[in-house]
Image (cartoon, helix red, strand yellow):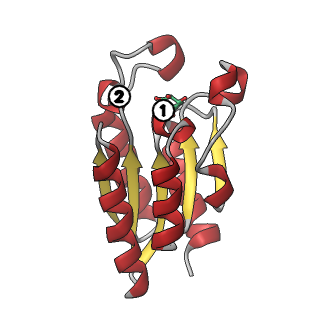
Amino acid sequence: MKTVFVLNGPNLNLLGLREPGIYGASTLQDVEQLCEQAAQRNGFALRFHQSNHEGELIGWLHEAGALRREGKLAGVVLNAAAYTHTSVALMDAIKGADVPVIELHISNVHAREAFRHHSYIAPVARAVMCGLGVQGYSLAIDAVAQCLHD
Ligand code: DQA
């Protein structure tokens, strides 16, 4: 059984409380349940994590890279949150670990402030999904199964 990683960046632990008009009412625990269901229906094991620290996200990308080398990784769904727009280190980690990543955002970042239009992740991602609310997580795991799983 291959593993899909779902990695969440800073402030996503506040889902449900945080700007509900933009991010909705679901909590991160609700999102984890959605992901568990999506992983199960696609026959994947799930690793679901959130961190407010860049280095921790990098560590999980490295772990995903190690699994990939063993042929045990399905793919990575990454909502890097604000680090999307700032982090050369995350971009380098994705390249270095050589993992297939779907960049995901709950909101449509392109309909928001200009500083959210640039992503350091997009050039090294296989695909980018945004604006589908928390259902985007479930759809991204389906996309891993259809497009990334080799
Ligand atoms: C986000 C969009 C980012 O711009 C923002 O910093 C977030 C969440 C989203 O899921 O819509 O924290 O990644």
Left or right of 4? Residue 118 is: right
Disc 1: CA contacts within 10 A as few (<14), some (14-19) or many (>=20): some
In the displayed structure, 139 sits above or below 97; it is above
Q: Pick whichever, 19 or 41, lies toward us.
A: 19
Numbered mark located on residue 150 in the image: none
- Vertical side of 135 occupied by 23: above or below: above
Residue 124 sits above or below residue 33 on the image: below
- Answer yes or no: is residue 40 visible: no
Residue type at the position of mark 2: Asn
Image-based side of 90 in relation to 148, left or right: left
Per the image, label 2 sits on a secondary structure element best described as loop
Beta carbon at label 1 within 8 Å of ligand 1: yes
Q: Earlier in the sequence, mark 1 or mark 2?
A: 2
Residue 42 screen position, x and y as percent: 47, 67
1 or 2: mark nearer the eye? 1
Judging depth in this view, the residue of 92 and 21 nearest the camera is 92
- Vertical side of 33 occupied by 116: above or below: above
Which is more toward the observer, 95 or 63? 95
| Image x and y of residue 150, in percent | 57, 82
Res 11 label: 2
Q: Secondary structure at mark 1?
A: helix
- Which residue is at a point 29% across and 41% down the rendered structure image? 53
